[in-house]
Amino acid sequence: MLGLYLHRESAVHRLPAGAKLGGLLLVTVAVLALPGAWGALAAGLIGTAVLVAARLPARRVLAELRAPVVMLTLLFGFQSLLAGGGWEETTVAVARFAALILLATLVTLTTRVTDMVDLFERLFGLLRPVGVNPAKMALMLALTIRFIPLLGEQVREVRMAQRARGVERNIAALFVPLLVKILTMADDLTAALEARGYDPADAGANDTKTKNSTQR
């Protein structure tokens, strides 16, 4: 759903992370507020314009949308059957979220993870008086952004193994090995952080000391 940073020499890449995320938030509000398919159409046009301006490969971007669109179609399709809604509403809902996923993918492909982390750390710094650790929250977001495409790769690997064994329609054959892979990745990450002696609490304290010394 969210791709990794792909460097290109473009005006979109040079925009600050705050401007991109702020624009994504405004477009999301507009898409959800506009009636019918107008919101999805507007977001799709904006996404196409950003895709061209950022000089990104369309095939890779569209490949990122394949899995979420299938999931959204199944989700809203079942909801339509259970709630008795029409397929037109389902199509509009899928189109809306697909357009938003396209925009979110473009943001992550044109923004370095470090820039995102720095932005969120500054934002979470406003919540420090109520006990929020900005360094810890920024690390959590960085890991989330990094692991989403990794999980997609793991799903594809498990799918390929399923096809080789002829059990691609078996749900348990997908989720059980995927869960094992996720837990293994989590253990490896924990071990790596402990080996490096990383402590977000110390990082937050060091940031506070640095700011205090700078003010003096």
Image (cartoon, grey):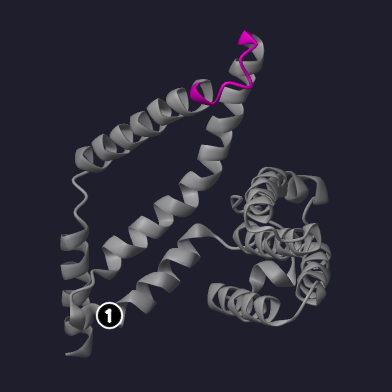
* Image coordinates for residue 6, horizontal then vertical, percent: 66, 52
Please name the residue shown 81% across and 76% down the image. Answer: 38
* Image coordinates for residue 37, horizontal then vertical, percent: 81, 71
Please name the residue shown 59% across and 50% down the image. Answer: 4
State the residue in front, 208 or 140. 140
Q: Quadrant of the C terminus?
A: bottom left
Which image quadrant is residue 87 in?
bottom right
- Above or below, 158 relative to 187: above
The answer to whether residue 168 is left or right of residue 51 is left
Q: Is residue 136 magenta?
A: no
The answer to whether residue 15 is left or right of residue 43 is left
- Secondary structure under badge 1? loop
What amino acid does circle 1 point to?
Answer: Leu
The answer to whether residue 44 is left or right of residue 206 is right
Count of numbered badges drawn on the protein? 1
State the residue in front, 132 or 35. 35
Give the residues drawn in magenta, as a range: 165-172
State the residue in front, 203 or 27. 27
Q: Residue extending furthest top?
A: 165
- Above or below, 185 relative to 173: below
Which image quadrant is residue 88 in?
bottom right
Q: Is residue 170 magenta?
A: yes
* Image coordinates for residue 104, horizontal then vertical, percent: 63, 63
Please name the residue shown 61% across and 24% down the image. Answer: 159
Please name the residue shown 57% across and 73% down the image. Answer: 21
Chief secondary structure of the magenta portion: loop
> Which residue is identified by label 1?
127
Badge 1 local density, few (<14 within 10 Å), some, or many (20+)? few
* Image coordinates for residue 71, horizontal then vertical, percent: 64, 46
